[in-house]
Amino acid sequence: MEVRNQNEKKEMTKKKNLIDEFIENLKNLSRGECAVLKRAAGLEIAESRGGMDVFYRILPRALMNSRNEEIYFLVATLYGLNKHTLTGNFGLTLHKVQESTKSSSIDKRMSALLDSNFDLLDGSKPGGGELAYRLRQCVRLAESKEIGVNWRQLLQDLLSWTHPARFVQKQWARSYFTTQVEKKGESRNEIESIESE
């Protein structure tokens, strides 16, 4: 059991290091390279025009031809769409967008995003599909409101998106909806305290 835990820790550390390396490579892209990837936002690797050479230069060698290659490509293509940064998960990003717009349509976007899935490419590799399309829209919307994305967290979350327990979707929902409920509760408490005076 102890050996198994040590192996799991080593595997998690390796995965984290690969994610960190990839994000650093994204940060070091030239504006031109970033623009090439940005034009492929929401597409699969095979559909991209001119993006493969840039992508495969920044993808760590250990990830080439991996099950999650398309997810890394998705994040690489979205990265150029939003130059702002934020701590927290993507649920918090959309919560901040909702706060800035006060639009109930953001609630609908969030619900649709939480229910979105990757297509299965080659029968087993997640990538593309409805989730990629909706993410592209939401990243652009956040950029238009000057609200950032935590790219490391987004990549980690997307790598676990297909987990049967849907823990990533739950975390995003908590970050988005719980903060709204708390704020509504604060408003009610303020009204009640004013009325009782």
Image (tube, rainbow, N blue to C red):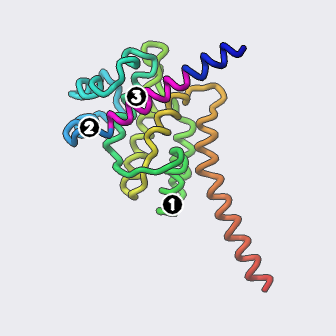
What distance separates the C-alpha of mark 2 from that of mark 1? 35 Å
Q: Nearer the viewer, residue 170 or 101?
A: 170
Quadrant showing the N terminus: top right
Magenta-tinted stretch: 11-26
Q: Residues within 10 Å of mark 2 (few under 14, many from 20)?
A: some
Instruction: Judge depth for marks 3 and 2 and give the one in front.
Output: 2
**Is residue 117 placed above or below 194 in the rendered structure?**
above
With respect to residue 28, does 48 lie above or below?
above
Callout 3 secondary element? helix
Which residue position is annotated with label 3? 72
Is 9 in front, or is 99?
9
Residue 33 versus residue 61 in the image, above or below:
below
- The residue most toward the right is 196
N-terminal-most mark, 2 or 1: 2
- Left or right, 194 with reference to 105: right
| Residue under numbered circle 1 | 103
Number of residue marks: 3
Which amino acid type corresponds to the residue marked 2 in the rendered image?
A: Leu
Q: Residues within 10 Å of mark 3 (few under 14, many from 20)?
A: many
Estimate the spatial distance between the alpha carbons at disc 3 and disc 1, rounded to whole Å: 31 Å
SS class, disc 2: loop
108 over 136 or under it: above or below: below
Give the overall secondary structure of the magenta segment. Answer: helix
The location of residue 51, given as percent across then percent down, is 25, 28
Q: Position of residue 86 (x, y in %)?
A: 46, 51
Sequence-wise first label, 3 or 1: 3
In the picture, measured across the screen, residue 151 lies left or right of residue 189, that is: left
| Disc 1 secondary structure class | loop
> For the C terminus, which image quadrant?
bottom right
Q: Amino acid at mark 1?
A: Ser
Q: What's the amino acid at mark 3?
A: Tyr
Q: Which residue is mark 2?
A: 29
